[in-house]
Image: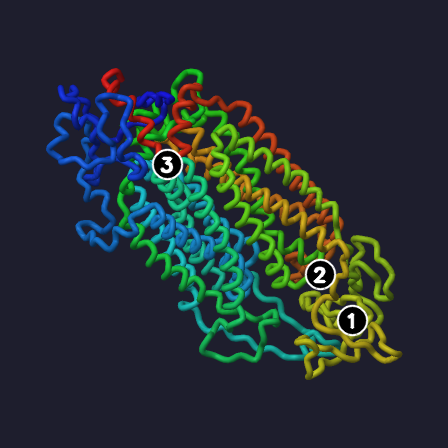
Amino acid sequence: MAKPPSLTGENGFHFPQAIVFPSPSPSGEDSAAFDTPGGTPLSNGTGCCGTPSPAESCAQPLCEARDSTQFGEGIKYVSTDGKELACGWGGFTPGCLQLFNTSKGVLFFLCVASFLQGMTVNGFINTVITSIERRFDLRSYQSGLIASSYDIAACLCLTFVSYFGGNGHKPRWLGWGVMVMGLGSLVFALPHFTTGLYKVHSSADVGVCAANQSQSCAPATSSLSSYRFVFMLGQFLHGMGATPLYTLGVTYLDENVKTNYSPVYIAVFYTAAILGPAAGYLVGGMFLNIYTEIHRETDISPENTLWVGAWWIGFLGAGAASLLISIPILGYPQRLPGSQRYIVMRVSEAHQLKDGSHKKASDPDFGKTVKDLPRSVLLLLKNPTFIFLCLAGATEATLIAGMSTFGPKFLESQFSLSASEAATLFGYLVVPAGGGGTFLGGFLVNKFKLRCSGIIKLCLLCTLTSLMAIFVFFIRCPNVPMAGVTHTYTGSALPGGHVNLTAPCNAACGCLRETYSPVCGSNNLTYYSPCHAGCKRMSEKLRNGKKVYKECSCFEKNTFPGEAEAGKCTSSCEKRTLLLFFMFIVILFTFLSSIPALTATLRCVPDRQRSFALGIQWIVVRTLGSIPGPIAFGSMIDKSCLLWQDQCGEQGSCYVYENSAMSLYTLITGLVYKVLGTTFFMVACVLYKPPPAESAQGSSDTSENGNSDLQETKPSLPAAEDI
């Protein structure tokens, strides 16, 4: 039987409770008895009764109960009161609550919290941002500040929360964080109730040729735009509240389950966070079909560009749910009952520094005061494996943030879809690929019982696979012909950059560039608006749920003026299935490496620095990845724009992209970041220096079989006085 590792801080763990090793009794009886904080013997409870120990002083079965008076001559944990491990609030710890005082119970409530966070921040916000811009007269850069407030708050709070929360009562930090997140959602919905009614009047003839096309430009600023500061406050509270969730929540799960099961628990936790945005898109889209003033009727439909949906309902529901879920999280103890065995048996896989300074983190008093903060940061900066894992995480986060923001736009342009159709199709890709990849990554680490070096190699393999698949962006679909943009009004190809929306057929219509409402003519040519197609009236009947415009002079149908349907013409891209398949592969393997990379980060640092290391990693990932990612992708994609929005002489968003250029720029951006990510994982793998071989050997027996965890350590107990 392999000798277990030394029980000193050098190997990465210590006993939080004092261990007393008195001289063995003459009879040798009762010398193997343990007292756990809960008052029961320290045992996994299965498979040990009746199995004699090779050591004479441990002849009694480990799982046999002992009377408390017999521990005077045995080996004993000097533990705290068992009430500190009970689930409850203060002195209120009813027995029924103890059913949830397990790792699975914690996982359930943390999954609900991460689901709500993902649904609110990454789902509702992205879904309603256009409606908020329209309702409160916001410019694009102002809505960008609202979105960025979340990451700014997280970066400001991460160091403080991860350092002090990592050495404090994690469930309380988590519970208060979720509560703050709920308050942020309520604050975000507040402007709906403090502004006047949204009033809009629409005429069916607006945008039709020969109609009154006069349109006064709105003032550059509006009093309603000041509400952006309220939205920024709500997002700031979202960022503050979510900070403990993905740092302290991960380490709390990791500390209270077996090392081998930790990646699975973390994978389930992150999968819930990925499913949240999918639910946010679906539920948020459903609410946007309801008029924002739910108690009033309107004469416009959701297809109208002036429509504002009930964007605020989702935030009220998510805020209330977050406040409720924070209550049970606040009731959990600092560590779960029975988790002491996992702390005792855990063997560090932390990167070994040449000067041995990593041993400082094993000091029980290290990290409890502010004066240790610089030393903690220095220890992490001297860990090359941790640094390169952070950089690799930042490159992957850049791709994820960029594709999350512009993936629907890419599909919308390539396949000539509406915004809602593109978002739905992208959701069908992300939910199975992102959620499945996240869970599968944790499952593989557990299935093959990978150690830190093996986990980094798995990340490298996943990144290489997605690097090969990203060449899918060589595939591109042709642009749908658009009059005055890609083709002339007679149907011939138009050189790029020569946009001319005016033609003899619509010269007398006085069409406005501000009114963008594409229609598809019966000649399969898309027009900027009914006016630009020369359409003189709108039919009272709908065709396939779409408006129909008649007497269009820019094209003919059987020698008569043509007809046009609202919306862009459909694309007949033959490579659509192949493009979607390889995009699925890229997303799958990108998310497949996320949980292994997170697990490797937890393994390559000392135990007492895990929470702080995650906090520092999140700062690096957000600063170098999540925040600049959409900016990098957006600036590259904007280079492929053919037709810009005209807002009273000011350039707005892009209406039409050149598909071939968009694919090329997306490929270049993705390729650069994937090559960087592969390089960083490779360097992390090469520079990783594991603990001595004897430590790894000693831990192998204690991690493979949960039923033998404590049995393997019994032979070393009589020799404990040699420590």
Mark in the foreground, 2 or 1: 2
Name the residue located 43 percent from the left edge and 21 percent from the top edge: 691
x and y, in percent, of residue 619 in the image: 46, 38
- Residue type at mark 3 is Gly
The image position of residue 463, as x and y in percent, is 60, 37
Looking at the image, is 534 positioned above or below residue 447?
A: below
Q: Which residue is at 57% across, 64% downward?
A: 219
Q: Which mark is residue 357?
A: none
Residue 622 at least partly seen: no
Q: SS for tag 2?
A: loop
Q: Helix, strand, or loop for circle 3? A: helix
> In the rendered structure, which disc, 3 or 1, sits on the residue that comes first in sequence?
1
Query: What separation in Å lies between label 2 and label 3 (alpha carbons)?
Result: 55 Å
Q: Is residue 423 visible?
A: yes
Q: Picture quarter containing residue 94?
A: bottom left
State left or right for residue 228 relative to residue 91: right
> Type of residue at label 2?
Ser
> Which quadrant is home to the C terminus?
top left
Q: Which residue is mark 3?
A: 706
Image: 192 above or below 558: above
Label 1 packing within 10 angstroms: few (<14), some (14-19), many (20+): many
User: Which of 20 and 462 lies nearest the eye of the viewer?
Assistant: 20
Q: How is the image coloured?
A: rainbow
Looking at the rendered structure, the kind of residue marked 1 is Gly
